[in-house]
Amino acid sequence: MNTTLKEGIDWVGYIDWTVRDFHGYKTDSGSTYNAYLIRDEKCAVIDAVKAQYVDKYIARIQALTDLKNISYVVCNHAEPDHSGGLPGIMEACPQAELVCNAKCKDALEKHFDTSAWKWRIVEDGDSISLGKRTLSFINTPMVHWPESMFTYVPEDKLLFSMDAFGQHFATAFRFDDEEPLDVIMQEAKAYYANIVMLYGRPIAQTLDRAAELEIEMIAPSHGVIWRSHLKEVLAAYRKWVVCKPTPKVIVLYASMWQATEHMAEAILEGVQEHEVEARFYNVDATHSTQIATEVLDCAAIAIGSPTLNNTLMPNLAGVLCYLKGLRPTQKKGFAFGSYGWSKRGGASEVEDAMKEMKIELMQEPIRSQYVPTPEILEQCREAGRAMGRYAEQFTK
Ligand SMILES: Cc1cc2nc3c(=O)[nH]c(=O)nc-3n(C[C@H](O)[C@H](O)[C@H](O)COP(=O)(O)O)c2cc1C
């Protein structure tokens, strides 16, 4: 496995082949916790790994240098998948300074016993010389937490981008040109949608700042390192930060006795009369991770639920809660659903959730008392056609 980014700069992280859950994000492809060692007149380690893999991380560092040579341990992000190993490395390298911004220090102190750590608090724009190379620091608040920071090495045109541009993707290879591009772009998209979609604005600002830097390589804290396809991932991020619609329509629903499902099928039929991509998701059959990934760049979404005990189906409510938190923008749609005896609950609550998500409503909810009649199914088809027509305009 080639772990060398540039002469004297190596990957010293951990490949987590078996992790399948990241705070609700289903990581079917595993992940990596990327950490890096820079060997110069002074040596620096960039980031750490999850606590349980600290020994393997330290062993990788030791294979390249004596731990006594480590002058700095940089923490770009305080989340435990990158900071969990810090107590271990700081104990193994008592001479090293922990380099981070003030917000990160505050967060680390609230996670770990840091009483023995030496600190070097940096501000946006500060730099530290390692000898031939410089570490310069760029605060990137809310990409992904308030303390998030990039570390840039101008001499190598190398950006350590923490969670930005990451992918939950375990592979034996460390670089973007060693895996199929469509696979890593899909993983990068899933990561963006499920981890940082709600931070589109700060990420857009960060992209503007990154555009001022000369960058040959982007080394994120998860997944492969971008050295051959920077242009592609940066262009994709420009689209994702605004949830740019593509000609794609989603029909998402829950159903107990298939009445709402038949409505969903009729909506789909209408959509398919247009030359657009369609996605059809029963919440019981599709994980919210995949739904969020597809919502990121859809143009329109119809969401349906029957009424159960005066409310909507709890499995759909969970997905809507997740999507609401991720705050997709630039979407249109409508609610639908079947009920028995009361128009409250079901479709009405779905519509309320869609309003909270600021999805632009294309029409009133479509409701069916019990099994939908041919007239109601035709209403569904017509609403599907309207979504298809709308989405079609995003065809290049
Ligand atoms: C357990 C249960 C609870 C229900 N609660 C309500 C309710 O509170 N209000 C209502 O109008 N209909 C209620 N219904 C009726 C359903 O909304 C109705 O049967 C609907 O057609 C089901 O749609 P589906 O076939 O898509 O599951 C309930 C049905 C079931 C099975």
Image: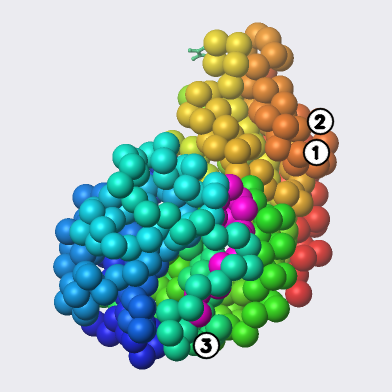
Instruction: Tell me how far mark 3 sits from mark 2, CA to CA.
Output: 58 Å
Residue at left offset 81%, top offset 30%: 364
The residue at which mark 2 appears reads as 364
Residue at left offset 43%, top offset 48%: 79
Q: Is residue 141 magenta?
A: yes
Residue 369 shown left or right of residue 121 in the figure? right
Pinpoint residue 18: horizontal percent, then vertical percent: 24, 55
Residue 244 shown left or right of residue 251 in the figure? right
| Marked residue nearer the N-terminal end (3 or 1) | 3
Q: In the rendered view of the protein, which quadrant contains the N terminus?
A: bottom left
Does any atom of ligand 1 lie closer than 8 Å to the CB of label 2?
Answer: no
The relative height of residue 91 versus residue 378 in the rendered view (above or below) is below
Pinpoint residue 186: horizontal percent, then vertical percent: 49, 66
Query: How many tags in the picture?
Result: 3
The relative height of residue 355 versus residue 199 in the rendered view (above or below) is above
The relative height of residue 95 versus residue 347 in the rendered view (above or below) is below
- Quarter-wise, where is residue 236 in the image? bottom right
Residue at left offset 33%, top offset 42%: 115
Q: Is residue 144 magenta?
A: yes
Category of crowding for the residue at label 1, using alpha-carbon neighbours closer than 10 angstroms: few (below 14), some (14–19), many (at least 20): some
Does any atom of ligand 1 lie closer than 8 Å to the CB of label 3?
Answer: no
Mark 1 secondary-structure assignment:
strand
| Front position among marks 3 and 2 | 3
Q: Nearer the viewer, residue 12 or 132?
A: 132
The relative height of residue 278 versus residue 210 in the rendered view (above or below) is above
The residue at which mark 1 appears reads as 361
- Quarter-wise, where is residue 221 in the image? bottom left
Pinpoint residue 131: horizontal percent, then vertical percent: 43, 84
Is any part of residue 386 visible from this angle? yes
Query: Magenta segment, which residues?
Result: 134-149
The residue at which mark 3 appears reads as 155
Q: Nearer the viewer, residue 105 or 342?
A: 105
